[in-house]
Image (cartoon, rainbow, N blue to C red):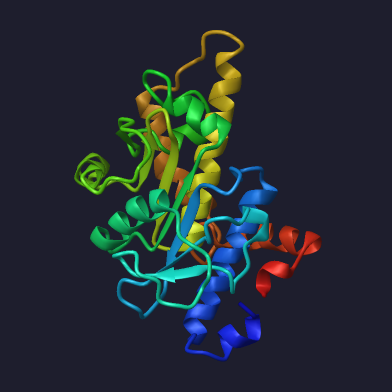
Amino acid sequence: MATAALRNSTVSPAEWEARQQLAACYRVFDMLGWSEMIYNHITLKIPGEDGAFLINPFGLHFSEVTASSLVKIDIDGNKLDQNPYPVNLAGFTQHALFHKHLPDAHCIMHTHTTAGMAVSAVEGGLQPTNFYACNFIGQIAYHDFEGVTVRSEEGERLIEHLGDKRVMLLRNHGILVMGRTLPEAFIKHWSLQRACEIQVATASMGTPILIPDDVVKVHQRDLGKVSLPGGAGKADFEAMVRLVDKRDTSWRQ
């Protein structure tokens, strides 16, 4: 779909901004090595449009996603634009569920990174063995693997296991994070990915030193003291987008 045709149709300024932000995020994920062939998903609600969200076109690599190629769908999986690409059922089933039932799940990210899948596949999951892991101790939900996520009945269990948390390790499967904004979800994913990478590296060296609960609590209490203005992840995400732009700006189209 031509960019001009899309922008001259019924796309609102808010939708176009959301499209560009999400397309940039796909390129950032690819730059960081988090692509998985043509699979995995990042979805983003469109401000002001109840039940409408954007998802990647099934068939494109993360490095190929552009603002105009993103597919606009509703909670029931119906396309709301003329995009010729299909939507991966495995992505729609899971993401639509959370977008429907969780008002604060504005952005949802799911990946199959090596470190994320490895930590999700060991007894005990993420352990308090490093700086980044301490960000999440007590804040991660777990859901047992039931096969590829294409059956709607699994949704009830996903919601139940998530509870009031917005970070989940899908056992034997990978990372799932949600945010009130895309940058917030991004910084959660980046931090959890780093935590998993370091845990995997530490496990290869011997018995890890576990950080005590009282220290974890102090760490989580004080994290806000090192945050920049503008909301969680905003400065981090903008820095990554600048790096992407040095390589390729086609995502903006």
Residue at 49% over, 85% down: 11
Question: In the figure, residue 215 lies in which quadrant?
Answer: top left
Extreme residue toward the right, this view: 246
**Relative horizontal placement of residue 162, taking residue 223 as reference (left or right):** left
**Relative horizontal placement of residue 238, taking residue 14 as reference (left or right):** right
**Relative horizontal placement of residue 230, taking residue 212 as reference (left or right):** right
Question: In the figure, residue 148 lies in which quadrant?
Answer: top left
In the image, is residue 211 above or below residue 206? below
In the image, is residue 154 above or below residue 88? above
Question: In the figure, residue 144 lies in which quadrant?
Answer: top left
Residue at 64% over, 86% down: 4
Q: Position of residue 15 (x, y in %)?
A: 48, 79
Looking at the rendered image, the quarter that the N terminus falls into is bottom right
Looking at the rendered image, the quarter that the C terminus falls into is bottom right
The image shows a total of numbered marks equal to: 0
Q: Position of residue 38 (x, y in %)?
A: 58, 49
Between 145 and 122, the one nearer to me in the picture: 145
Residue at 59% over, 74% down: 68
Extreme residue toward the top, this view: 206
Q: Position of residue 231 (x, y in %)?
A: 48, 63
Residue at 62% over, 54% down: 62
Between 175 and 140, the one nearer to me in the picture: 175
Task: Tell me if residue 126 can be seen.
Answer: no
Q: Position of residue 140 (x, y in %)?
A: 35, 37
**Relative horizontal placement of residue 233, taking residue 149 as reference (left or right):** right
In the image, is residue 189 above or below residue 45? above
Task: Tell me if residue 142 can be seen.
Answer: yes
